[in-house]
Amino acid sequence: VRRSVVLSLCVASLAAAALVARAGFAGDDLEELRGEIVRASQANDAARVVRALDRVASMVGPEKAFADVGAAADWVAALPDGVTGRPVVQVRLGWMYVTGLRGPDALPHLEKALRAAPSDARARAYFAEAKRQAGEPAAAAGELARAIGDGVPDDLAEWGVTKLVAGLLTYGKKGEGTALPEYASAAETVFAAKDFPAVRRSVALRLSFDAEEERVDAERSTALRTAAVRHAWAYLRRAPADGESARLSYEASRWVAALGDARPSGLPERFDLLAAAVRMGETSDPEAHQVPEALAAMAEEALAKGRFVLAERMARRRLAMSDSPAARRVLLRVPADVGD
Amino acid sequence: VPRFFTVGRGAVRRGAIATALTAVLAARPGLAADAPPAPAPPAQPPKKKPVVPEIVGIRWEPDFEAGLRRAAREGRPVFVAVNALEGEGANEMLRREAYPSESWGRASRPFVCFAANGEQHEERKGPDGQPACARFGQGPCAAHKDALVWTVRRFGSMISPQHAVLEPDGATAYHKDYFTGEEGAPFLDAWAARLCPRLVARRVWSVRDLQTRALTEAHVAALEVRAKEWLASGDGYAPAGVVAVLEQETDAARRAALFAALRTAPPDAEAALFDPVDAATASPEADREATAVWVDVALAVAPELGDWAAARVVPRVKDGTAWVKEFSRWSRTARRIAPPPHVGRPLPEGLRDPSRDVRRASLWAASPSDVRAAREAVREALGDRVEEVRVAAALALRRAGDPTGAETLLSMLADPVEGPDVRRALVAWRGEDLGEDPAAWDEVLRAEGGPR
């Protein structure tokens, strides 16, 4: 018993000593870092300042000098004005606050940085995210679009728009009348600068869902459905030809059908979307298709358009896969001398 | 527990030494080869295949989206049963007695079936070993919730119980709120026969083995009566069963008896007749007699199918004189739908003809003065539902010097859907291809004259 008590005490003492030493080292490190940043700043050496700030950022984490990145940003913000007034430090501060989800704290730093360098695309992308965190999605979308125009790297732009739209999908305002929901209007602002296919696809699907939810209000439902089709069509024009794209195209053809006579000119017709669904759903087996329903629907649509050869071909293909009353109905209406 | 942990340190040490020695022996091939061969391992008892208890009643689909896709892929109709009002009499009766019964289960086999319920229930092991909702015994609650959300959105009804049948491609075939006794095994059989006749034709040999055996074993004199009795019984599988038996019969008398019986089939038999009628009329010369009988049966059972079948035969026969008897019998229907394509009629009578070939031929054959005389009728033909007729009408107007013709053709050329077909027609008309650019065609189409 005595031996084990002594052993435990030794282990505890060693652990405590290690912690004290670490804290001491951390304190020493910070002091040294502060000196380094000030000296680099006085020497007007931006690269050295950035390297030192990177070291600050690396000291965030459990059992490190800073519990979170916000605390590290607070430490940087408390450095002398000669240091924090430099644009490079302002941008770093903005980035740190944004990373720590403290957008409102990032805003003044990024505003100053952008005043000094208005075409700094990266700083503007951080500024957009800070605006988003501060609850200004429309401004965030505008800033992000401007950052994209200024040449922000693709990964940063995609990160920004994904955060923006995903957040608004959950917390954004629904909109009233024919106004689009916040997620859609923000996305449209960004898409005007650059297309983000994955985000666009999500927006299209969500708009169609919302259109269905709002179907008691015909005008609103039509506006949402129209926007859904527009986004889906824009996505499909560049989408990979696979089963998922084919299914989205088929679904979008149903949205267009639901629009009926309210379909505005310029929006693709049901025929166009079904044609895309048929093309994208092809497989290496000519008798198979990834979206068999699209073949039957295409047959019906071709019949309605008087394209009997196409209608017959689509119906036959559908029936070659499996039973389809819809395809049988089409064949019964195709002129008798078509086919075979 | 290994022995050396229980008998003290000496055993541990001995065990450790033995292990080390074994390792040394194994590491030296020479020594290892000298060792006697190890005894053969005892024979493993054959592994038992896991027994999946058979589900007697309805088999509920475990994934809603995947289920809908399976339905389309396999050509199966969809059966949706909303059972969301827990504790209510009809809901509980259906859940406890109807759905798990053998009759519902057997009749629902051709369907992809969904139970729809919005509650989260206790999870237990399902018959397939996967987690399953305790209320329905199969599939997770998530699948039942998805089905309910979909049903409410599709039908806008919050009533429970509620049943729906969908075609394999998703169109609604049947939907009804509440349960008043219509749905059941005969109901499911009838819908299966209508919506997936091929599947039913395959199943009929097993699920109607008594009836099919009775037909195959019946004497020819009694065959027609037996088949008629089955068809008149109201069994949804009967038409598919009679067709299936007929298709494997080679004896002419027996086939004639079954054909005679089929003429008395109810109109619902249309689905079961479609495939054989389609096959027979695709190449009518292959078996003239069979084709004629199939068309007659179709005309007797389902006039729409019969009209279509008769109309298909007319343009496919090489020598019409050989079919005079049949044509005279079918003329009332077949000629109405498919007059021979060479029959071009003068404007504007030809433009009123239901055959697109006649409408198109009348336009092509019309002189500019004919077109000018029937200008309004030709302009109406610009809105014809058949593109070839629209192109012919536009060209006819152009020949007659009406600028509407050229304008219509140019707008059709610019249409992404119609454009290629219109261009082909124009190439055939002009004898040369001016390319994809409508501007190139603009000059030619607006010019006076030009080839006819």
Image (cartoon, grey):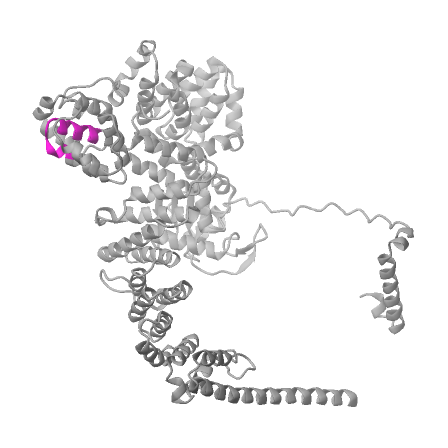
B86 left or right of B335 in image: right
User: What secondary structure do most residues of the magenta stretch adopt?
Assistant: helix
Q: Is residue B435 left or right of residue B174?
A: left
The spot of residue B36 in percent (x, y) is 91, 50
Q: Is residue B89 above or below residue A135?
A: above
B199 falls in the magenta region = no
Give x and y (percent) for residue B14. Answer: 89, 68
Q: Where is B246 relative to A97, above or below?
A: above
Residue at 48% across, 42% down: B104
Q: Position of residue A263 (x, y in %)?
A: 23, 49
Horizontal and vertical percent position of residue A20: 61, 90
The magenta region covers B389-406
State the residue at coordinates (84%, 48%): B40
Q: Which residue is farthest top?
A: B321
Report whether residue B94 is seen.
Answer: no
Depth check: give the residue in front, B443 or A135: B443
Closer-to-camera residue (B91/B4) = B4
What residue occupies the far left of the structure in this picture? B373
Count of numbered badges drawn on the protein: 0
Tell me if I can see residue B125 in this picture. yes
